[in-house]
Image (spheres, rainbow, N blue to C red):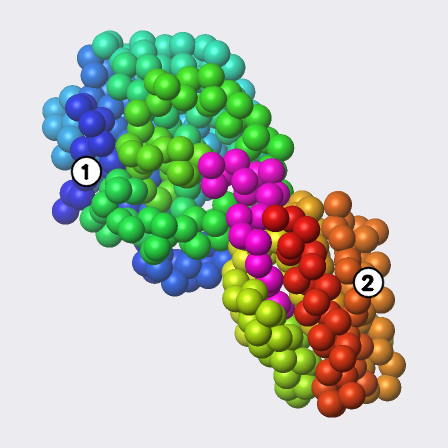
Amino acid sequence: MHCVRMVTDNLYWVGANDHRLTLFENIHPIPKGVSYNAYLLLDEKTVLFDTVDWSACRQLLENIQYLLGDRPLDYLVINHMEPDHGASIEEILLRYPEVQVISTEKAFMLMRQFGFHLEGHGCIQVQEGDTFSFGSHKVTFIGAPMVHWPEAMVTFDSTNGALFSADAFGSFIALDGKLFADEVNFDRDWIDEARRYLTNIVGKYGPHIQLLLKKAGGILDQIKFICPLHGPVWRKDLGYFIDKYDKWSRYEPEVRGVLIVYASMYGNTEAAAQALAARLCEKGITDVALYDVSNTHVSYLIAETFKYSHVVLASVTYNLGIYPVMKNYLEDMKALNLQNRTFALIENGSWACKSGDLMQKFLEEEMKDMTVLNERLSLASSMLPDKAAELDKLADALAESLQEQN
Ligand code: FEO
């Protein structure tokens, strides 16, 4: 059964929702699913913008067939070749032997690497600023390298103002009937998953997103729809989401508050983390979030770390090193290029307390623009009453630092 929605005159969403996939990219949990968006334009020529994951190919084909009826598919525009969008290309080529493919040089190389058979199809290679007319709709191709792969581009339709933005402005969560961001309570129900998507999938390439935002800035007044490859289409309040993307890609925190992430084996380090959270709240700092690193998938921690200005890492010492799950979180932060945050440290060790020095060294020597506060809470096994003054000093230092940024 087809399942399509109209974006605007002659332009339709023909993608699919996926509630079966447990791990996106086989790494990131997606408990609320994900959508693979593709769009079909019915002009003098018919044009499919991107395809979907192989698991959703049948739905895509039914959607296209329903809208095309007896018409052929004339063009396939590929903005991004990662298989969650490009995997169904081969099936489109087989079903529509006359279809011509429009994409970048690198994308054509990737299509061949993935084993797609382009022989017999027109392959139109485009580059930055090239334009193309499908009848009444004229599009411009804009390079978006490393958002999120090197071949990526976005396509702007100057006739209806639709920006096919590839991975940019995407989000986790299946659409389930809704298509537009204004059909959901995005700020309440979607923003956390949008942040988790962006920071974990494309977070490393902040400068490249900035470059794309600069290019989009030049045509901002003409953009009426942002049509990403995941998540809802934006037709209202575009500035809200563009501003979020701007912040995330500049590695600027959204919230002045404290994220506390603890690694605790028997509950003693956790108790210190909880005591600190309570002290902060007593001081009026209530924007505090607390997570157990062992029980929270790192993709959630990364998203929260992008959100908050201050991060407290509380870790036991393990094999004379940083607790492995905490180390993995730190490595992920580094891999995703996170920078410009203020950290405070809580360390614990019953017989050789090393985790504080090691975490500080990692933050200062392996990451960019990270500040580590001088005050540190150092525990030998557990948080005893004699540590109350140290805890207070740490809470005061955080409060002062938060104030400085105001
Ligand atoms: Fe949703 Fe980079 O693919």
Residue 55 in sight from this viewpoint: no
Mark 2 C-beta closer than 8 Å to ligand 1: no
Residue located beneath label 2 in the image: 374
Disc 2/disc 1 C-alpha distance (Å): 56 Å
Is 222 located above or below residue 383 in the figure?
A: above
Q: Amino acid at mark 1?
A: Arg
Q: Give the x, y percent position of residue 112.
A: 51, 30
Q: Is residue 350 left or right of residue 17?
A: right
Is 159 located above or below residue 403 in the figure?
A: above
Q: Give the x, y percent position of residue 95.
A: 27, 31
Determine the secondary structure under disc 1: strand
Start and end of the magenta stretch? Answer: 243-261
Residue drawn where x is 73% and y is 90% of the image: 385
Q: Residues within 10 Å of mark 2 (few under 14, many from 20)?
A: few
Q: Amino acid at mark 2?
A: Asn
The residue positioned farthest toward the left in the image shown: 69
Which of the two discs, 2 and 1, sits closer to the camera?
2
Residue drawn where x is 44% and y is 54% of the image: 192
Is 114 located above or below residue 375 in the figure?
A: above
Q: Give the x, y percent position of residue 328.
A: 68, 63
Residue located beneath label 1 in the image: 5
Determine the secondary structure under disc 2: strand
The residue positioned farthest toward the right in the image shown: 352
Of residue 120 and residue 239, the one placed in the foreground of this image is 239
